[in-house]
């Protein structure tokens, strides 16, 4: 029996996003959003990267690099990251930042 997706609200760089995910992945999604928010804030604080989209791309590159260095990404983490990547593409495409 598959679980119906639920919508979770996350905040990243003071913007709210609604993301669909399975009920049992809500906590992982929230933790991922907090991690992404922290990374994006670190990058923004350097003052070297401007614009939400560029900050998001740099954060994604940094996080991906960290994960590839660990080489222990689980199948569930891979699916979650792919889902979040797709959703970020959709959201960033809508806002035009």
Image (cartoon, rainbow, N blue to C red):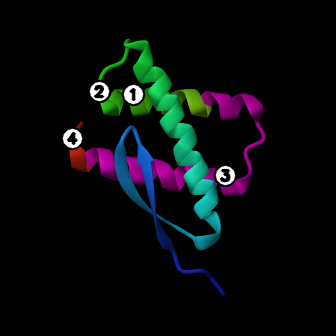
Q: Where's residue 28, x and y in %? A: 63, 55
Query: Could you give the CA–CA distance between mark 2 and mark 4, rounded to whole angstroms?
Result: 10 Å
The numbered disc on residue 77 is 3
Is 68 above or below relative to 49? below
Q: Residues within 10 Å of mark 2 (few under 14, many from 20)?
A: few
Residue designated by label 4: 96
Q: Main secondary structure of the magenta part?
A: helix
Rendered residue at 34%/45% (across/down):
15
First in residue order: circle 2 vs circle 4: 2
> Residue furthest toward the front?
14
How many neighbours does mark 3 have within 10 angstroms: few (below 14), some (14-19), or many (20 or more)? some
Residue count near mark 1 (Cα–Cα under 10 Å), binned few <14, some 14–19, many ≥20:
many
Q: Which mark is residue 55?
A: 1
For residue 95, side relative to residue 42 (left or right) = left
Query: Would you say 89 lies left or right of 22 here?
Result: left
Q: Would residue 60 be counted in the magenta stretch? A: no
What residue is pinned by disc 2?
A: 51
- Residue nearer the viewer, 74 or 31: 31
Q: Which residues are magenta?
A: 65-93
């Amino acid at each position: 029996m598959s679980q119906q997706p639920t919508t979770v609200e996350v905040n990243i760089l003071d913007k709210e996003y609604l993301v669909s995910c399975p009920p049992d992945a809500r906590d992982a999604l929230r933790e991922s959003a907090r991690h992404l928010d922290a990374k994006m804030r670190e990058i923004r604080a350097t003052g070297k990267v401007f614009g939400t989209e560029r900050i998001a791309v740099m954060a994604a590159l940094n996080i991906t690099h960290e994960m590839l260095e660990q080489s222990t990404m689980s199948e569930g983490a891979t699916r979650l990251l792919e889902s979040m990547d797709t959703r970020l593409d959709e959201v960033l495409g809508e806002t035009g930042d």
